[in-house]
Image: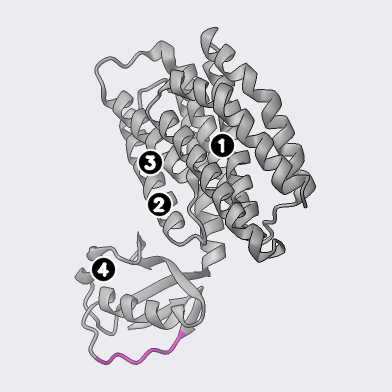
Amino acid sequence: MVLYINEEKVDIVIEFEKNAYEVIQSLAGFLAGESLVISSVEINGNTYSLDDSALKNYEINDSLVINIDAQTRQELVESLLRESKTILNNIVNDIKINSFANSGKFVDLFLWIIETVDLINKNSLFKLVEVRLITSTIQQLIDYLKSDARDENKSESMIGIILNLVEYIEAIELKTSTDFTINKSDLEKAIDEAQELLPDISADFQVGKDKEALNKINKIISVLEFCCLYLKKNLQIFNRNEQDDIDDLYNSMNSMLGEIVEAFENGDVVLIGDLLEYELPEKLEIYKNIILEGK
């Protein structure tokens, strides 16, 4: 057997492994110690994932050649997110040209994106709310593509929703970046902008500007998440007596974030409007008074 890792030939000692799958699993454990993960496996021109059971079909012999791509976790996350955005933009272009003629292919690609963002979420330092939104939105798209009620005149609406998914992925790119920080002044500016957007969202829904409303909700969700992350990352700047209040504030903001996301997932426009118009403004003011003005 000949083994290449990132196009460099490496020596490997086979002990108990009988097939390519067992070799890859053993190698994955070794590479993990070097802070690397296997991103793909290529044998005989075919590409496989790390856990693909088809690898068991390749028995160890002198003629077997295995090519492995290995990356750091950060590199893998970045490449997967880039690929996800490329896929979504390609789907948008296909819909513009062919409407829903290739909907079967879209479903498979959408499922791959769900699996990809779920994997990233499981390995993230904090839970990414965008993953919930991506998963629920894609599932709704899949259900629509599979339904008999599919209307080709709705292609523009679907394109708008898919472009929203691209924005979610870009938010994940930002939050998983090694350079990601939350600056107090930037957060204050983001909250001010969110407060200005709040009154417009219900109005947009009422006049049929769903795309505009969804874009604004995306921004509100991101701001709320930044508010929560700022508290988590900066808890140490508060004294011990203040930390209980900060925990309460975090739980309150996080609960509001969860309610908005759940309402968004369920398509409950009325509840979204109520939360954003009547409850969130007060919570944002409390947050600003305690965190941004108090420190």
Q: Name the residue tied to disc 4.
A: 55
Q: Name the residue tied to disc 2.
A: 118
Residue 104 position in % (x across, y down): 30, 32
The kind of residue tagged 2 is Asp
Give the residue displayed 37% in from the left and 82% down from the top: 2
The kind of residue tagged 3 is Leu
The tag earlier along the polypeptide, 4 or 2, is 4
Looking at the rendered structure, which numbered label has been put on residue 276? none
- Alpha carbon separation for disc pair 2 and 3: 14 Å
- Alpha carbon separation for disc pair 3 and 1: 26 Å
Give the residue displayed 43% in from the left and 71% down from the top: 68
Mark 2 in CB contact with mark 1 (< 8 angstroms): no
The tag earlier along the polypeptide, 4 or 3, is 4
Numbered range of the magenta stretch: 10-15
Q: In terms of image quadrants, where is residue 171?
A: top right
- Alpha carbon separation for disc pair 1 and 4: 42 Å
Residue 12 drawn in magenta: yes
Q: Name the residue tied to disc 1.
A: 221
Mark 1 in CB contact with mark 4 (< 8 angstroms): no
In the figure, 132 relative to 141: above or below?
A: below
Quarter of the N terminus within the rendering: bottom left
The kind of residue tagged 1 is Ile
Mark 4 in CB contact with mark 3 (< 8 angstroms): no
The tag earlier along the polypeptide, 3 or 1, is 3
Residue 123 position in % (x across, y down): 45, 62
Q: Name the residue tied to disc 3.
A: 109
The tag earlier along the polypeptide, 2 or 3, is 3
